Image (cartoon, rainbow, N blue to C red):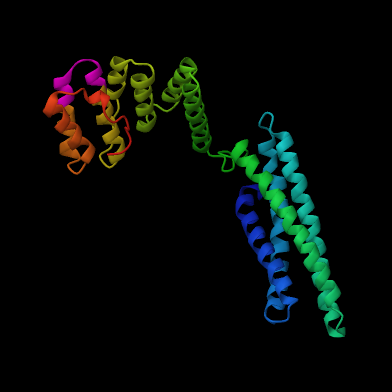
Amino acid sequence: MFDIGFYHPLVIHFAISLLIIGVLLRWISFTGRAPFTGPAAATLLLLGIVAVVAAAWSGEDAHVAVEAIPSIAPAVRAHQMWGERTRNVVLGVATCEALALVLKRRGRARPALLASGILGLVGVFCLGETGKLGGDLVYAHAGGVGIHSGNPEDVGRLLLAGLYHQAQLDAHTGRLDDAAALVRLAAQRFPSDPAVQLLAAEFLLVDQHDPGAALVTLGNIVIPKEEQRLRFRHGWLTVDALVALKQPERALVTLQELQTEFPDSARVRRRLEEVNKDGRNPLQEDRDYRTP
């Protein structure tokens, strides 16, 4: 059969909005103060039920690739179980709404509509649990991230994100050797990505205190002119590396070049003024390499 797993994130949002608004309008319709809410509720609920069924179907297709990730199967099964519960409950809502349409001519539709409203609330609760578990699956377990499209570049971005965040965590907890290994791996896997190479240079300078290696890495990075933030970061890191290597003249030249390229940067102007004023070490100043 046609695999619609790729569309699961899109379909589920339609299901959520249609079902919640439909249930809300159904309960408003019981007040009798807004006659339009009855037909609107029926329309939205029936559309929402179609969306929920489609979401359950697409979820079945999507979980095959996700469940192959080690240790993620229990989270996938929990999400799937609540998704099936939601589908079953809203099918009950559909039955009540259809029955109400049949009984409307006899003036006996209210019990069926009331049952629809009650089951709708149960469906919204189930939908909330399903959504919570789906969020955990994506954000806590990286389920489906980078693999839905089948594009190798997407998987590469997933790998890069994992390497970056784990390296930051390792560095924060004092495991600098582990962090360094991850940053080196990222630099090796993404040699043409200037942002990754800048991260490697920054780590060499700040965390490993190796300005010489950082300067060599910076010298090999080519950054397009339109990447202004990366160009600023590159220059700022270069200045700090040169200062750490006790080459203040070259550092000053690089800082002046930065001022030429970023004439409106208050940070560059302030740093130049302080260096020219009393010869203070620029490395002791602002260590934010990302903001001009």
How far across and down, in percent of the image, does residue 258 sit? 19, 34
Residue at (67, 28) in percent of width and height: 70
Q: Is residue 201 above or below residue 267?
A: above
> Between residues 163 and 113, which one lies in front from this camera angle?
113
Q: Is residue 247 above or below residue 24?
A: above
Residue at (72, 62) in percent of width and height: 50
Q: Is residue 109 magenta?
A: no
Residue at (78, 50) in percent of width and height: 84
Segment tinted magenta in the rendering: 241-252
How far across and down, in percent of the image, does residue 182 sit? 48, 21
Give the side of residue 6 with respect to residue 42, left or right: left
Quarter of the picture holding the C terminus: top left
Q: Is residue 32 above or below residue 134?
A: below
Instruction: Determine which quarter of the picture holds residue 202.
Output: top left
Residue at (69, 54) in percent of width and height: 55
Q: Main secondary structure of the magenta part?
A: helix
